C-alpha cells in the first residue's frame, strides 16, 4: 500500500464523516414523521428495535447476498437495489437515533434548537463509532441494527402502545 492509497482511504473516511450529519439532518427535514417515529421507538423500546433490526437484516440481507452472488446481471441489479433500500431504511433509523441522542444532550446541557441537537447527536454517534475496536465492533453493529429495526417499525407506522409508552419528554419532536 503506497502513500496515495493511504491518502485516498483517509480522504474517503473524512468525506463520509463530514457528510453523515448532513444526511441525517436532511432525512429529518424530508421525512420528519418517520424520523420522529423512529426516535420515539428507540426511546421507548430499544431492545425491540434491536431484535426487529436483526430480523430485518436476516430476512432482507440473506436474499440480497444471494442475489449479489448470482452471475445474472438483472438479478444482481435487483440485489444492489435491495441493498440500497436496506441502507436507506437504516439511514432513517440512524436519523432517529441521532435525534434521540441530541434530545438527551439538549436536556442535559442547555438550550439549542432541535436541528442543532440532531447535528450534535449525529456527531456524537460518529465519534463513538470512530473509537477503535469498541466503536467499530460493538457500537456500529448495535446502532445499525437498532436503527434498522426502528426504521422498519417507523415505516410501518408502528408506534409504541400505552404499555410501552416513552418516558416524559420523548414525544415526537418532528411530527
Image (spheres, rainbow, N blue to C red):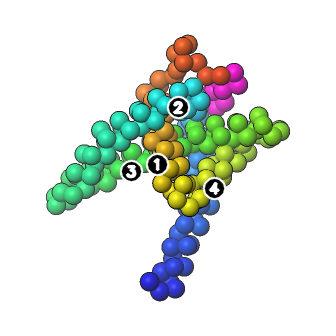
> Which residues are the magenta region?
168-175
Q: Could you tell me what secondary structure mostly forms the magenta stretch?
A: loop
Residue 50 visible in the snapshot: yes
Residue at image coords 55%, 13%: 162
Report helix, strand or loop for mark 4. Answer: helix
Q: Earlier in the sequence, mark 2 or mark 3?
A: 2
Q: Identify residue for label 1.
A: 141
Q: Earlier in the sequence, mark 4 or mark 1?
A: 4
Q: Nearer the viewer, mark 3 or mark 1?
A: 1
Report helix, strand or loop for mark 2. Answer: helix
Separation of marks 1 and 2 at Cα, in angstroms: 14 Å
Q: Earlier in the sequence, mark 1 or mark 2?
A: 2
Nearest the viewer among 45 and 123 is: 45
Q: Is residue 112 left or right of residue 8?
A: right
Q: Where is the N terminus found, in terms of image quarters? A: bottom left
How many other residues sit within 10 Å of disc 3, few (<14), some (14-19) or many (≥20)?
A: few
Picture quarter containing residue 13? bottom right
Residue at image coords 54%, 18%: 164
Which residue reaches farthest right? Answer: 110
Q: Identify residue for label 4.
A: 127
| Rendered location of residue 84, percent (x, y) | 38, 50
| 72 relative to 4, above or below | above
Which residue reaches farthest front? Answer: 134
Amino acid at each position: 500500500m503506497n502513500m496515495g492509497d493511504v491518502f485516498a482511504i483517509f480522504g474517503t473516511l473524512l468525506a463520509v464523516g463530514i457528510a453523515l450529519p448532513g444526511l441525517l439532518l436532511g432525512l429529518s427535514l424530508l421525512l420528519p414523521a418517520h424520523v420522529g417515529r423512529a426516535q420515539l421507538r428507540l426511546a421507548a423500546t430499544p431492545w425491540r428495535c434491536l431484535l426487529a433490526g436483526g430480523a430485518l437484516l436476516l430476512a432482507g440481507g440473506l436474499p440480497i447476498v444471494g442475489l449479489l452472488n448470482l452471475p445474472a446481471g438483472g438479478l444482481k441489479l435487483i440485489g444492489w437495489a435491495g441493498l440500497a433500500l436496506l441502507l436507506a431504511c437504516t439511514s432513517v433509523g440512524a436519523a432517529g437515533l441521532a435525534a434521540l441522542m441530541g434530545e438527551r444532550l439538549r436536556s442535559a446541557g442547555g438550550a439549542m434548537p432541535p436541528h442543532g441537537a440532531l447535528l450534535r447527536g449525529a456527531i456524537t454517534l460518529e465519534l463513538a463509532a470512530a473509537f477503535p475496536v469498541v466503536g467499530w465492533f460493538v457500537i456500529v453493529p448495535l446502532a445499525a441494527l437498532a436503527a434498522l429495526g426502528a426504521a422498519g417499525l417507523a415505516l410501518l407506522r408502528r408506534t409504541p402502545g400505552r404499555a410501552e409508552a416513552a418516558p416524559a419528554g420523548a414525544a415526537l419532536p418532528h411530527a
